[in-house]
Image (spheres, coloured by chain):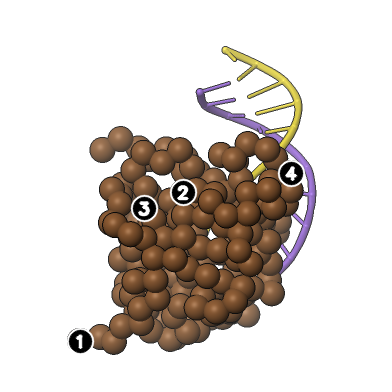
Chain colours: A brown, B purple, C yellow
Amino acid sequence: MRPTYLLAHIDFHAPAPEVARQLIGVTVLVDGVGGRIVEAEAYDREDPASHSFSGPTPRNASMFGTPGRAYVYRSYGIHWCLNFVCREAGHGAGVLIRALEPTHGIARMKARRGVEDVRLLCSGPGRVGQALGIDRGFDGLALDSPPFVLHPREEEPPIVTGPRIGITKARDVPWRFGLAGSRFLSRPFPKA
DNA sequence: CTTAGGATCGCCT
DNA sequence: GGCGATCCTAAGC
């Protein structure tokens, strides 16, 4: 049996798609600001679409680090995107947090984002980063201690799956997970 | 509704 | 030199 590392009832030693599924409905806060995860995508070492596919670099080093920590990367030279590292140390797997349903610190997120519409606060990975005040300084931080707080979900929610967004490789892999019916998804899921 | 272009960083070829 | 795990704005149908 593989070992487990439970945090907010999530097994961070599990494969990335499983962790992504477990994360839907979990609340993530950074300095008290955040919301419920409604959308996440899995990335694995043996995955052409993953940053870890070609091995460690300075940029993706924390993806090869300890599970249950953050992997933060700069997207298109502009946005900061938040991932949760999973599997065993050195493996190179993680889950991209793509969208939250805002629940905590909404005024703060509106100010950071420069928008009033709650639906535009955290509906997309770049938006999540900006709303939560994420930058390079958060890369590698443990998710079980400040500024991070994770609250477990109370029940397993209805989950939809589909192909990942914005990638050109491995488009057929259905490793995008979402809360069914949520108004806060970055984009709708394709019908069955 | 859809499409196009710009901003701009890290790593690859 | 090219290309992203993106977002915003503007323009076209």
**Element at badge 4?**
loop
Cα–Cα span, label 1 and label 4:
48 Å
Which residue is denoted by mark 1 in the rendering? Answer: A1
The amino acid beneath tag 1 is Met
Give the foreground label among 3 and 4: 4
Cα–Cα span, label 1 and label 2:
33 Å
* Residue A125, image x, y percentages: 56, 54
The amino acid beneath tag 4 is Gly
- Marks 3 and 4, the one that precedes in the sequence: 4
* Residue at x 29%, y 57% (from the top left corner): A155
User: Would you say residue A41 is visible in this rendering?
Assistant: no
A36 shown above or below A31: above
Q: Sort mark 2 into few (<14), some (14-19) or many (20+) by Cα contacts within 10 Å.
A: few
Question: Which quarter of the rendered picture does the C terminus of chain A lie within?
Answer: top left
- Marks 3 and 2, the one that precedes in the sequence: 2
| Marks 1 & 3, CB-CB < 8 Å contact | no
The amino acid beneath tag 3 is Phe
Between residue A120 and residue B11, name the one nearer to us.
A120
Tell me, yes or no, whether dots 3 and 2 are on the same chain: yes
Tell me, yes or no, whether dots 1 and 3 are on the same chain: yes
The chain that hosts pointer 3 is A
* Residue at x 28%, y 56% (from the top left corner): A156
